[in-house]
Amino acid sequence: MAHTKETLVQLLAPGLARETGSSEKEFRQILETYDIKGLERELDRQRREGLISQQSPQHTPQKDSDWEQRALAAIRATQEPTPELAAAIEARRQEQIKLCLIHIYRTSIDGRFARMCQANDDVILGWLHPGEDYPTAEWFKKVLAEQPSLANSIAWESADPIKRKQAAAAQLERDHQTFAEAAKTIRTFGVNEANLNVTRSVLGSGFTVYAIQQALLSNALQLSPPTQSEREEWLADDIERHNQELLQANPEQLKARVREEAEQRRAVDQQAEAEKALEAAQARDAARGGFPPLPTEITREKIRAASPSEIRLWLRKYGQYQLNKTLAVQEN
């Protein structure tokens, strides 16, 4: 029998509510995000596990008998929910944790409040023991009462509104400075209010340059690129710093710096020449009609150890570009 989406949502919510201990309303909202196929898969699962009647789409009784409760407990211990349901349950759990943390940050402890930031989130959640799912405000007070030294591992702010406002303003200024330093160091994003606000929302206040680097590498943080004027400003700063270092260097340091820069320029020039030669070889080989791919067994080591006759044979068969490219790529 085919069911509409609305019928499936109404049909599935009671079983999920009993299975997880949550309310039907919550699961109706979750199930509304499913498509028909996802709802039908969940229907099949509930029927297999005895959570729903095979024949009737009507709700099962709101209150289970002792036998039914034991059966559901056994099912929960041996059966896994569908991937869609597991993801929805975990998302709901994370939302509940965020709400719990907000209550904790609004709880006064000895005339002060824990600062709302990602670092404190991580520390406080680390205090949970196995079996403790949510960090409530009462739990927070109890943990600190039993182990007062734990208070030193999180950041605090005054309960005085004026002092809190002053502290927030000072922290914002420090965040501005850290963010500008990170932008100048990493150079993949611009210094603007939108980027700063995104960074503070993801990392919280009081972040470090290293935290921004790691968040960018993990794609937890995505920021807009720098403007051309910012790139030019950073380049000008680099030149100014370089000139100042040269002016402050003693004769020996200056000679060493000149040699180092000459070596760097030479390496850059050699790389440019090598790339130019490769492009020329590629153009010549293409003009001759192209060559079959170079076999993988012809490696850099094999080319370097080859006799002149082997090299001539490979040049005729595979072209100069592929041999030169193999040498260059494997050396790098």
Image (tube, helix red, strand yellow):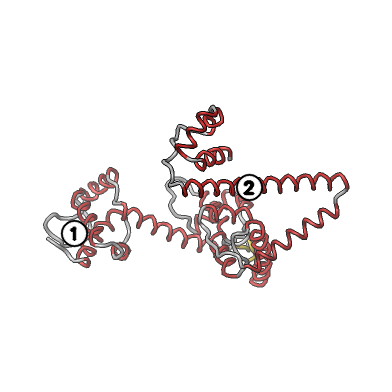
Three-letter code for the amino acid on which mark 1 is drawn = Thr
Q: Nearer the viewer, mark 1 or mark 2?
A: 2
Toward the viewer: 79 or 283? 283
Q: Is residue 201 above or below residue 129?
A: below
Q: If you read the primary sequence from the N terminus, does the residue marked by circle 1 or circle 2 appear first?
A: 1
Please tell me in which quadrant of the rendered image residue 228 appears: bottom right
Q: Which x, y percent locates residue 70?
A: 24, 47
What residue appears at the point 45 percent right and 37 percent down from the top-left corner? 317
Three-letter code for the amino acid on which mark 2 is drawn = Glu
Label 1 sits on residue? 60
Q: Is residue 241 above or below residue 252?
A: below
**Element on which disc 1 rests:** loop
Q: Is residue 235 above or below residue 145?
A: below
What residue appears at the point 29 percent right and 51 percent down from the top-left corner? 82
Q: Which x, y percent locates residue 36?
A: 23, 62
User: Distance from label 1 to label 2 (Cα)?
Assistant: 78 Å
Q: Which x, y percent locates residue 1?
A: 12, 60
What residue appears at the point 73 percent right and 61 percent down from the top-left corner? 237
Q: Which x, y percent locates residue 88?
A: 35, 57
Badge number at residue 89? none
Label 2 sits on residue? 273
What residue appears at the point 27 percent right and 43 percent down from the top-left corner? 78
Task: Classify the position of the C terminus by image quarter.
Answer: top right
Tell whether 322 sits left or right of 172. left
**Element on which disc 2 rests:** helix
Toward the viewer: 82 or 323? 323
Callout 1 crowding tier (Cα within 10 Å): few <14, some 14–19, many ≥20: some
